[in-house]
Amino acid sequence: MTQTRQKTVLLLGANSDVAKQAILLYLKEGFRVMAASRDTSSLKSFSIENQIHEENFTIHFFDAADFDSHNSFYQNLPQKPTIVVYAAGFLRTNEEVFDHFHDGLQMMQVNYAGAVSVLNLLANDPENKNLKRIVGISSLSGVRGRRSNFMYGSTKAAFTTYLAGLRQHLAPRQVTVNVIISGYIRTKINAGLQLNESLMMEPEFVARHIVRAGKGFAIVPGWKWKIIYQILKLLPEFLVARMP
């Protein structure tokens, strides 16, 4: 792995719908993109469909739940990243997790533990002078515990808290850490769920907020979701308990 003058972004969980849109946007901005996912064949098809030039785009196998592989994964990257985006995600309903704890464990590993494992490696590499930003995709489900989705929400709450602390840890190195606190996105992870259509966001819309992230920590895409986010934060517990 080498240093480079060209700005480089590493997308972890790059097969997600939002991450794929972010890839296209970063390439337009002149970044070299390293896309990492378990499903490398899908990324290859994506690159062909969008006529992405290989000199600015590389594909790497990455398994968020295989913690022991993370160090070798990082060391074998062709370049040290300027920006890191953690977009890996796994969703199971409360009912599924209650019946099958393994599904819940996988959700915890992908959404939280895997993120901590690999981001710790990236953040604590003193040789990477290029690192300027880390962005994690979280969810409004993690703002308050709600009976309908607290299993999934707990993994996102943990991830958001981790990123908040990581932001403080990296501040002396002038590395910015952002969290995207997203509402409903029209993606394959939400396919089949009964969600409010008027609140749905397109992947490209959310991806723009990732690529254009500034200095602030919490980024909530969409004005409707900004209002919902503030309401959720301020609601008394007895009212939260009445929510579905």
Image (cartoon, rainbow, N blue to C red):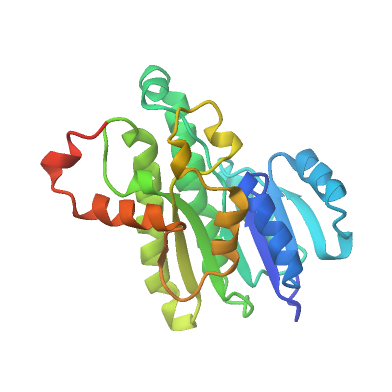
Residue drawn 50% across and 51% down? 115
Viewport quadrant of the C terminus: top left
Q: Can you give x and y, in whole percent of width and height, for residue 118 in the image?
A: 55, 55
Q: Can you give x and y, in whole percent of width and height, for residue 145 in the image?
A: 26, 41
Residue drawn 43% across and 30% down? 104
Q: Can you give x and y, in whole percent of width and height, for residue 12 in the image?
A: 62, 53
Residue drawn 82% across and 65% down? 56
Q: Is residue 163 above or below residue 187?
A: below
> Left or right: 85 with respect to 236?
right
Viewer-closest of 110 and 199: 199
Residue drawn 43% across and 36% down? 196
Q: What is the tally of numbered marks visible in this picture?
A: 0
In which image quadrant can residue 126 be found?
bottom right
Q: In the orientation shown, which residue stands out farthest toward the top?
A: 99
Residue 76 visible in the snapshot: no
Q: Can you give x and y, in whole percent of width and height, for residue 198 in the image?
A: 45, 41
Q: Is residue 39 above or below residue 73?
A: above
Q: Is residue 1 above or below residue 117?
A: below
Viewport quadrant of the N terminus: bottom right
